Amino acid sequence: MGGTAKASVPSGAPHARRVTDTITAFLQPVPEPTRPVVRKNKPARTVPPQAGAPVRPAGLGTLAGWETEVVLPVSGTLTTPSKGSPRPDAVLTAPQAGVPVLFVEVDNGTEGPQIVADKILKYRRFLRRTVKDTNGHDIPMWQTLYSDHGRRAGYPPLAIVFTKQVGPEAMTNRMKAVRDLSTECWKGHWHSGSIYGADVKDGYRDYDGTVPVIVTTLARLHQHGPHGPIWWRYGRSSWETLEAALDNPDDYRAFHAREEERRAERRAQEEREQREREEAKRRRKATAWACPTCGRDVYPSDGWQSVPPGSDCTVCTHAKESERQKAEERAAEEAQAKAEAEAWRKENGIFGFLRR
């Protein structure tokens, strides 16, 4: 599908040399110490003891894991790709290092930001391409070329290494220009997952169908190695290590973890409230006495007013109050009937006609 990294500088072209420099910066090989050549008929020079090999940052992958001159057909075949197919400067496969596949673009600053951004769009077009598997199902073509074992959400990442020697401000402006012109390719889609109160909202970003783009400079890559905090992931605000730059801390995994924490907090709160209710019920039960009339539990307070100790329960109190009221009503009725009868007797008795 492509050539090996050893063949990346066949003609000594400047861009090809930069590609080789980039691969070397990824690998971080340790220079081997040299020894003087012993010439015939001349005694060997005494070589002073050399210091240990210089300490270099950890590299990524092996030389065998690099390919150059690779074509990724958006249509057509690997041997006859269509126009507009991306051609990465190098491709790294290092599944043992947690990087199943990494596409690498080396930017020498000879092309405008729009051309560089268009390359990202071409990568997305290729990564969206599907082919039929042996069962007739559609699968992404890139998965037939590279393993996706351990892949994070989204497509395989694209690393852009800027090599031109310019000032920090000019370099930052170029990186930002490429970022702004390719936003649709790398930006995740926000999903509002939950709303907690008026001020607390939460959600996550979906990175499916997006191309993770990480950028750095060749100088940073050479000095700190691929695992150093040298990568700027488009959409982020700081330099990160490779592992952090390729991770998606704001995707559904993190949201799901926060949801689990919130559910656990709610369960704990409900359990605390249940224990408090049971404790309050227990304390209230301890203050109760038996109703003298029916034996029901009577509490010092019925929620509306205090109840004197030893009093009847509410049911019995109401029943007795009702009987008392009925008795008073009967007594009043009897008194009224008696008064009316007495008045009638006086009015209509045996001497009543004498008063007419």
Image: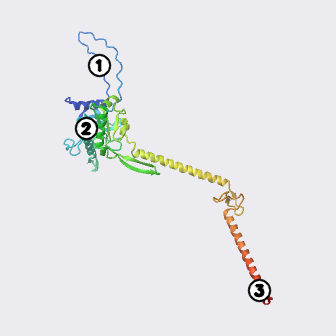
Q: Residue 210 at what x, y percent from top left? A: 32, 45
Q: How many badges with numbers are in the image?
A: 3
Image position of 150 (left or right of 305): left
CB-based contact (under 8 Å), mark 2 and mark 3: no
Q: Alpha carbon of mark 2 to alpha carbon of mark 3: how far? A: 128 Å
Q: Residue 53 at what x, y percent from top left? A: 34, 22
**Label 1 crowding class (10 Å Cα cut-off): few <14, some 14-19, many 20+?**
few
Q: Nearer the viewer, mark 1 or mark 3?
A: 3
- Identify the image quadrant of residue 322: bottom right
Q: Establish if 96 lies above or below 324.
A: above
Identify the mark at residue 34; answer none if there is no mark. Answer: 1
In the image, what residue type sits under mark 3?
Glu
- Identify the image quadrant of residue 81: top left
**Label 2 crowding class (10 Å Cα cut-off): few <14, some 14-19, many 20+?**
many
Pick whichever of labels 1 and 2 is earlier in the sequence.
1
**Circle 2 is placed at which residue position?**
88
Q: Nearer the viewer, mark 1 or mark 2?
A: 2
Pick whichever of labels 1 and 3 is earlier in the sequence.
1
- Which residue is pictured at 30% across the width and 37% down the height? 173
